[in-house]
Image: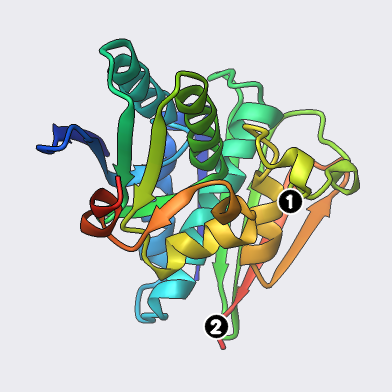
Amino acid sequence: MAFTTSKNPTGVLIVEVEGQLIVGNRQELKATIQQALDNGERKLLVDFAKTGYIDSSGLGALVSISKKVREQGGELRLSGLNEDLRSLFELTKLDTLFAIADDSAQALAGF
Amino acid sequence: MEIALRIPSEVSLIEEVVELVARHCFAGWEPPRRVQFRFRVALSEALANAMVYGNGQQPALCVEVRAECLPDALHIHVTDEGPGFDPASVRDPVMPDDLELPCGRGLFLIRNLMDDVRFTPPGNSICMTLRRT
């Protein structure tokens, strides 16, 4: 389980979730995003192309992160959800809360 | 075939336990990716609920996992040492006003991902069934 961050030329901070996003590591993701916000980042993309599964704590962490980013005038997008991961967002109706792109290229194109 | 584990309430162990039980349950049977996904999410969720809400994340309190791998179905039992709860009191978290809540989706996910879910009174033991067909 790891979070890899990089910044693209247009100023979007990309956080890749490798492995699982679950109760055991959700705080690490929240801390990574908080650090980015503290550093002045306002365009954030969380990419799940390398993610196995997400539990409800991981979904909850994304909800909290979304709120925090919005409160600070930023924008958060998600990308790379495979069919299984996307089904979790649809089941919980969280697909209505997040801007979800098929892949990071599509997400970055519209930022 | 059956596997039984007794583990301390350490959330850092969840991923490893899920993989161990999955390897056992999927030995000799390779279900579609979607079924494996449902299994892993539901078991991860049940373990998290047992450790965090059931046992209050007290490492001294343990969670028991027992998986029965039958020809027609998998039955996964997860039991904590807490006082239990009334599962009927947990409401679905998909109402518009609840969407931004950071918690409350665990049981909802389990119920939607598994084929059958039953609790044993007083509510500290869950049995999740995943049919093979």
Q: Is residue B33 left or right of residue B100?
A: left
x and y, in percent, of residue A10 in the image: 15, 37
Q: Quadrant of residue B13?
A: top left
> Is residue B129 at all visible to an observer of this figure?
yes
The relative height of residue A96 versus residue A59 in the rendered view (above or below) is: below
Q: Quadrant of residue B103?
A: top right
Neighbourhood count class around disc 2 (C-alpha, 10 Å): few under 14, some 14–19, many 20 upward = some
Instruction: Decide which of B89, A98 is in the foreground and name it.
Output: A98
x and y, in percent, of residue A36 in the image: 28, 20
SS for dot 2? loop
Which residue is at 40% across, 72% downward?
B26
Q: Residue furthest left?
A: A9
Q: Amino acid at mark 2?
A: Arg
Determine the chain carrying the residue at label 1.
B
Q: Which residue is label 2 attached to?
A: B132
Q: Residue furthest bottom?
A: B133
Instruction: Name the mark nearer the viewer: 1 or 2.
Output: 1
Q: Residue furthest top?
A: A38
Which residue is at 78% across, 48% downward?
B95
Residue B94: image tag: 1
Which residue is at 71% across, 60% downward?
B111
Q: Is residue A36 left or right of residue B63?
A: left
SS for dot 1? loop
The relative height of residue A64 versus residue A107 in the rendered view (above or below) is: above
Instruction: Decide which of A25, B131 is in the foreground and name it.
Output: A25
x and y, in percent, of residue A75 in the image: 40, 34
Q: Amino acid at mark 1?
A: Val
Q: Quadrant of the C terminus of chain B?
A: bottom right
